Image (tube, helix red, strand yellow):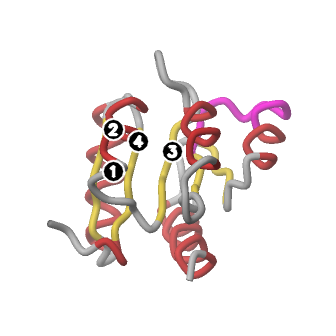
Amino acid sequence: MQDQKNLVAVVDDEESVRRALGRLIRAAGYGVETFSSGSDFLQSLPRRKPRCLVLDLRMPAVSGFDILQALQGLPGGGVPAVVITGDDSTDSRERALKHGVRAYLRKPVDDAALLNAIQAAMLSAV
């Protein structure tokens, strides 16, 4: 089992994005668990709760917004989320920020900006 205090979950329906983000985050010294769908991620929560979530908004079936809403109802508080999206509309940004995301980054995401956002989100969860 991975170290939960350092665990980052990545939820994105694009395999190439998941792989690239997983490599980047692992190389920065974090544990990583990747999910190809929002439902897979939500089903994993009873087993372990990550310290930070890197989340795509636009996914089939269970969207990133659905996940953010579900996390708000978790006992003991939610999981700090960093959104990465190709849809940088004003509406999406405002909706995500209303759900309390720690950062809202546009794809293709800058590696340093993402790692800084993850670190800041983890510090906010302490």
| Image position, residue 68 (x, y; %) | 61, 42
User: Relative to 121, is 55 above or below?
Assistant: above
Measure the C-alpha gap from mark 3 to mark 2.
Answer: 15 Å
Residue 11: give its label. 4
Q: Is residue 88 magenta?
A: yes
Q: Are marks 4 and 2 in contact (CB under 8 Å)?
A: no
Q: Are marks 2 and 1 in contact (CB under 8 Å)?
A: yes
SS of the residue under disc 4: strand
The answer to which of marks 4 and 3 sits earlier in the sequence is 4
Looking at the image, which is closer to me, 35 or 88? 35
Q: Which residue is mark 2?
A: 43
Looking at the image, which is closer to me, 50 or 23? 50
Measure the C-alpha gap from mark 4 to mark 1.
Answer: 16 Å
Q: Residue drawn at (64%, 50%), measured in percent from left and top?
A: 105
Q: Which residue is mark 1?
A: 46
Looking at the image, which is closer to me, 83 or 49? 49
Measure the C-alpha gap from mark 3 to mark 1.
Answer: 18 Å
Measure the C-alpha gap from mark 4 to mark 2.
Answer: 12 Å
SS of the residue under disc 1: loop
Q: Locate the C terminus and report the quarter of the image it occupies.
A: bottom right
What segment carries the magenta color?
Answer: 84-92
Q: Is residue 85 magenta?
A: yes
Q: Residue drawn at (52%, 75%), measured in percent from left and top?
A: 122
Q: Are marks 4 and 3 in contact (CB under 8 Å)?
A: yes
